[in-house]
Amino acid sequence: MTDPVPHRPVDRLYLWLLTRPEQPLPIAELNLVRSNQGVSLRYLAAWLQRGFPLSEDLPLIDEEFLPTEKGVAVGAVDDARPDRWGERVIRCIDKPARLSLLEYLYFAGDDRSGALGVSTSAEHYLPRRLGPLPTLDEADQIHGLIRKVQENEPIPPEQRRLISPGVTMGGARPKALLNIAGDQWVIKFANGEPTDTPLIEHAAMTLARKAEIRVAATMAVTLTHGHAVAVKRFDRNRDVRVHCLSAGVALRAAAERFGYPELAQLLRRKGVTAGDLYVGHMRELFRRMVFNILIDNTDDHETNHALLMTDAQQYELSPAYDVLPSGQALGFQQMRVGEHEADSTLANALSMSQMFGLRKDDAVRELRTVTRVVDGWKEHFKACGVTSCDIDLYAQQIDRPLLREQRNEVKGGQPRVG
């Protein structure tokens, strides 16, 4: 089902909290800021009395929070926007009369990432709705529609519900939402790469699980042509939605650099404290950083990490997602690793291991755990159905001297430090 009446551009919309979708709560007004093409926020009076700060840079005070950068929404609101693929879907299918960030926030719809919703009304939650989610049986049909979007071909109105524009944080990969046995999954498709990227992602994610990394559940989906990968949403628990922040938004709100050590310190300061769970999350973040280095995942930018917010407004590290080899052999990560900035070396990772709550010997043990698993990546990828041709292509990066020698040093008991 599409919108009953065409959406007309307005300069104000309203933000709602949907942790319990049957009881939506109005939060704030959102206003278009023409001077820098962004979106501001002003809390409603009722939220100031009973709500919580959506992010650290949006404290509960009665003032308008203005974006300080061009083309962004303030604080946590920026995570409610569609990703690059979602923007493309909106331009192709909805063709809004105006393409400001406010329109993108509205057309992202009711199934966007996290627990925030955008409405045309402050009194009633009136989002843009698409209708029932497709099922796994419709994956091939979705794949065909995605090709239409990529070629700017018209999509029949009755099929528009099959492509959701606002489902995840970050990324330009074609994707949509599925209902699988009552749970929401994101289904991701190839984007013209020379390899079977969706199957590679499934293999890499399940390899990370072997390295004792919590990852979002994945399943490989066989299509008429190639594969897709389905990833279970961690910001949904059936009818309950979880407020979450990308690492980029959370670190920017805390006035910190985009780095793994900085994210670890944010977990130390604001992470859940029950049973020192934040200590475990800091240790796991270190393990994820090492895994990304060793499998050549150099697309580990700040929107590919997320924090879940508890009812007590404490942070939990979300399950890992968007983990796969980049196949670029860049030699540097997208986030700071250690004293040598973003250099993709285990020595750099060890240089600031104390920021993750790890003593040097503990950090070396983590290196060995991950290295032992990554050493078997070829056998694991083959067991997941990845072709020998694709494995050979990725081996040129994952097994190149820079990374292979580092793995050998760890196995030999002499990892370089600093």
Image (cartoon, helix red, strand yellow):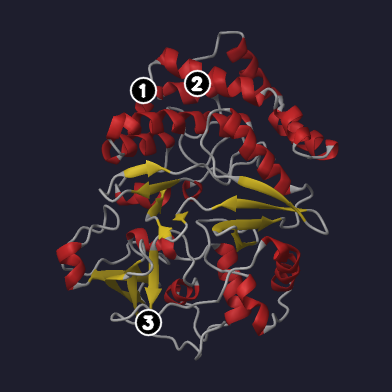
Specify whether 8 is left or right of 216: left
Dot 1 or dot 2, earlier in sequence = 1
The residue type indicated by label 3 comes to: Thr
Dot 1 or dot 3, earlier in sequence = 3
Asked if the residue at tag 3 contacts the one at tag 1, i.e. Cβ–Cβ closer than 8 Å, the answer is no
Tag 3 secondary structure: loop
Residue 373's label in the rendered image is none
Residue 331, above or below 370: below
The structure residue drawn at horizontal position 65% and vertical position 42%, both measured from the top left corner, is 326
Task: Name the one closer to the observer, 278 or 124.
Answer: 124
Q: Is residue 50 in view?
A: yes
The structure residue drawn at horizontal position 40% and vertical position 62%, both measured from the top left corner, is 78
Dividing the picture into quadrants, the one containing residue 262 is: top left
List the residue tagged with mark 2. 366
Tag 2 secondary structure: helix
The structure residue drawn at horizontal position 62% and vertical position 39%, both measured from the top left corner, is 205
Residue placed farthest to the top in the image?
Answer: 413
Specify whether 77 is left or right of 49: right
Residue 120's label in the rendered image is 3
Closer to the eye: label 1 or 2: 2
The structure residue drawn at horizontal position 38% and vertical position 39%, both measured from the top left corner, is 263
Horizontal and vertical percent position of residue 162: 64, 71
Q: Give the spatial CA distance, label 3 vs label 2.
A: 49 Å
List the residue tagged with mark 1. 354
Is the residue marked by circle 3 packed among few (<14), some (14-19), or many (20+) residues within 10 Å?
some
